[in-house]
Image (cartoon, grey):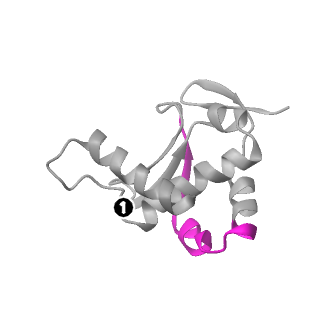
Amino acid sequence: MQYEIINKMEVKDYKVDRDIYHLLKDEPFFALLSRQLDKRPTDTISTAGMRYNPDRLSYELIYNPKFMLELSNKHKKWVLMHELYHASLGHCQQTWRWTWQLIHYQICISMHLILF
């Protein structure tokens, strides 16, 4: 098994592109969107997320490889869909005066209704 170092964190080799490929076979809606996003492994978050990177002027799908490795294929697909819906619905930047945590919960509830 290969290991790689991410922010001084040693993790088993995990390739998000492989899981995105499987998602795109079943859900082609995400194909164009996923091609436009940078994908970055990180240990600064515990799960996965979307963010705007002002240095690169692009949106990024960020994910914790350890978290993704622990999921079943079905759950990985769901997490990727959840995060890509954030991007497709324009929920990647804080533009409101409300607390971001409250907005995130509302967005997640709405997306769960779409997914189920």
Q: Is residue 45 left or right of residue 103?
A: right
**Count of marks overlaid on the render:** 1
Q: Secondary structure at mark 1?
A: loop
Residue ID at (36%, 56%): 92
- Residue 72 figure quarter: top right
Q: Is residue 40 magenta?
A: yes
Q: Position of residue 66 (x, y in %)?
A: 65, 31
The kind of residue tagged 1 is Leu
Mark 1, residue position: 57
Residue occupying image coordinates x 70% and y 37% = 71
Q: Nearer the viewer, residue 36 or 111?
A: 111
- Residue 4 seen by the camera: yes
The percent position of residue 77, horizontal first and vertical second, equals 67, 53
Which range is magenta?
Answer: 24-42
Does residue 73 show up magenta in the picture? no
Q: Is residue 51 visible?
A: no
Q: Is residue 35 left or right of residue 50?
A: right
Determine crowd level at label 1: few under 14, some 14-19, many 20+ residues with C-alpha closer than 10 A. Answer: few
- Residue occupying image coordinates x 40% and y 57%: 56
From the viewer's perspective, tell me whether residue 27 is left or right of residue 97: right
Q: Quarter of the image containing the C terminus?
A: bottom right
Front residue of this view, candidates 74 and 115 = 115
Q: Residue furthest left?
A: 97
Q: Is residue 92 above or below residue 2?
A: below
List x then y, in percent, for residue 110: 41, 57
Residue 30 position, x and y percent, is 59, 69
Using the image, determine if residue 76 lies above or below residue 44. Answer: below
| Quarter assignment of residue 21 | bottom right
Residue 22 versus residue 101: which sits nearer the camera? Answer: 101
Task: Locate the N terminus by quadrant.
Answer: top right
